[in-house]
């Protein structure tokens, strides 16, 4: 065989081998050893922490928050906790139909919100009312929504805790699990095209991370390099299913590697760590036009919702441990006391102030009129169709005739 023919065959074989290589999107090397990647032999992802359970700063890598900002954050966390207790009790009394608390996750939610900017659009799941509160959604707004009054900005069409605040750049809560995640990525892609210097944030729980929507969203965000923050609240349970029965891998953060994105695992009960991580991730996402996944390790102290009884699948001792030994509100409170920014007298005074404000909003909403029944025909089409007009007239005739059976005095 001639030298020239041998070189030609070599080039042909090289092209065949090259064309057969998988297009992984990353550089790879050949090996002559058959090797498995064994997750049980790999180190677990560490959890970033700044503040320990006793209120002590353990690193110099803490966020630069002023004393005023820290006290304001603590007050919002405390207010959220107290509001949750009252609304939970009111549901048990039959005064609201449904409720979900944020108990045990106050730092994860409000710490994230405080680290974001108003220009950042937020897509929440259903346990992030603290984000709404931080951005200016008032107690009265919350109560009107939970009681479905005529002043509820969703017009009484949503079940309780499904808030909406377009004016605060927060999208409406949806019951359908994880649908907000691909929506957030699409929104981020739109912002990227428009040149808007902001991130889009998708909150979800570790249970929702099992939904196909989350997979599709993360893959899309990574491939299209959308500035998206995926914030996963890993609170230990997907309703009654513990994390041990949800996944065999190292939690949620590790999944980002497969999608080709950066990720962080953070102590979700540590206000400082949450704020530092979200603030930094926001900067990374904008500067690199890329998504970031943040797994906030926390614990759901309350029941999944008022339709759930968590004593059926976990012990009271387990709940008490997290509530007493690793409370995010209590941990930040200890830090403030050590810094002489808070004390017992202030705590008692603020507790009374919170209860007065909460009950004032509660009582006003409870005594308010319900939305007009005729609002059901609005917002379906831009203008009323003939069919909608006929249905509205039929309802009017029905209520004119049988209105005494409907307590119409309770409606606007």
Image (cartoon, rainbow, N blue to C red):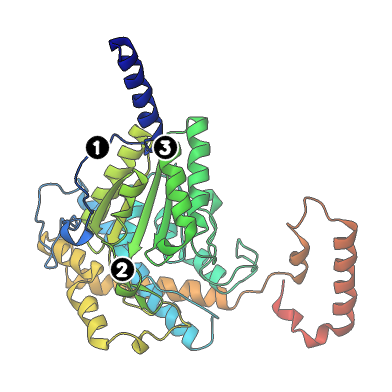
- Judged left or right of residue 108, residue 356 is right
The count of marks equals 3
| Pointer 3 with pointer 2, Cβ within 8 A | no
Tell me the quarter of the picture where residue 30 sits.
Answer: top left
| First along the sequence among labels 3 and 1 | 1
In what quadrant of the picture does the C terminus appear? bottom right
Q: Which residue is mark 3?
A: 225
Q: Residue at x 75, y 58 (%)?
A: 380
Q: Determine the CA span between mark 2 and mark 1.
A: 56 Å
Residue 359 in the image, given as x and y percentages of width and height: 45, 76
Observer-side mark, 3 or 1, equals 1
| Crowding at mark 2 (Cα within 10 Å: few <14, some 14-19, many 20+) | many
> From this viewpoint, is residue 40 visible?
yes
In what quadrant of the picture does the N terminus appear? top left
- Judged left or right of residue 3, residue 18 is right
| Crowding at mark 3 (Cα within 10 Å: few <14, some 14-19, many 20+) | some
At numbered mark 1, what does the secondary structure look like: helix, strand or loop? loop
Please, is residue 89 above or below residue 269 in the view? below
- Judged left or right of residue 326, residue 311 is right
| First along the sequence among labels 2 and 1 | 1
Q: Which residue is mark 1?
A: 30
Q: Residue at x 17, y 75 (%)?
A: 325
Residue 247 in the image, given as x and y percentages of width and height: 33, 67
Q: Which residue is mark 2?
A: 78
Residue 280 in the image, given as x and y percentages of width and height: 27, 43
Residue 369 in the image, given as x and y percentages of width and height: 66, 74
Observer-side mark, 3 or 2, equals 3
- Judged left or right of residue 97, residue 92 is left
Mark linked to residue 100? none
Please, is residue 148 above or below residue 381 in the view? below
* Residue furthest front in the image: 1
At numbered mark 2, what does the secondary structure look like: helix, strand or loop? helix
């Amino acid at each position: 065989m001639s030298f020239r023919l041998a070189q030609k065959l070599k080039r042909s074989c090289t092209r065949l081998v090259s064309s057969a290589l998988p297009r992984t999107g990353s550089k790879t090397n050949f090996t002559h050893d058959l090797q498995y990647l064994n997750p049980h032999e790999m180190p677990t992802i560490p959890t970033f922490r700044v503040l320990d359970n006793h209120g002590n700063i353990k690193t110099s890598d803490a966020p630069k928050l002023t004393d005023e900002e820290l006290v304001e954050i603590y007050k919002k966390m405390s207010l959220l906790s107290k509001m949750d207790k009252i609304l939970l009790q009111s549901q048990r009394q039959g005064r609201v139909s449904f409720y979900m608390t944020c108990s045990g996750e106050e730092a994860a939610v409000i710490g994230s919100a405080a680290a974001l900017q108003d220009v950042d659009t937020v897509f929440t799941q259903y346990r992030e009312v603290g984000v709404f509160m931080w951005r200016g959604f008032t107690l009265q707004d919350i109560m009107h929504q939970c009681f479905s009054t005529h002043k509820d900005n969703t017009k009484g069409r949503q079940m309780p805790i499904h808030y909406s605040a377009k004016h605060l750049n927060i999208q409406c809560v949806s019951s359908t699990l994880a649908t907000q995640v691909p929506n957030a990525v699409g929104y981020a892609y739109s912002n990227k095209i428009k040149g808007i210097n902001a991130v889009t944030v998708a909150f979800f729980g570790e249970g929702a991370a099992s939904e196909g929507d989350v997979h599709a969203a993360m893959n899309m965000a990574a491939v299209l390099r959308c500035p998206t923050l995926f914030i996963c609240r890993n609170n230990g349970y997907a309703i009654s299913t513990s994390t041990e029965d949800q996944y065999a891998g190292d939690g949620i953060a590790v999944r980002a590697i497969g999608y080709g994105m950066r990720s962080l695992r953070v102590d979700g009960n540590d206000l400082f760590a949450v704020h530092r991580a979200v603030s930094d991730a926001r900067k990374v996402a904008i500067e690199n036009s890329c998504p970031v996944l943040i797994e906030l390790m926390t614990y759901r102290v309350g029941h999944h919702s008022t339709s759930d009884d968590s004593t059926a699948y976990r012990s009271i001792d387990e709940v008490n441990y997290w509530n007493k030994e690793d409370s995010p509100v209590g941990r930040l409170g200890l830090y403030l006391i050590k810094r002489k920014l808070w004390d017992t007298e202030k705590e008692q005074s603020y507790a009374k102030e919170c209860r007065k404000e909460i009950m004032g909003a509660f009582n006003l909403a409870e005594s308010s009129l319900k939305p007009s029944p005729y609002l059901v025909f609005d917002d379906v089409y831009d203008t009323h169709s003939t069919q909608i007009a006929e249905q509205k007239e039929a309802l009017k005739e029905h209520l004119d005739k049988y209105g005494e059976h409907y307590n119409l005095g309770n409606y606007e």
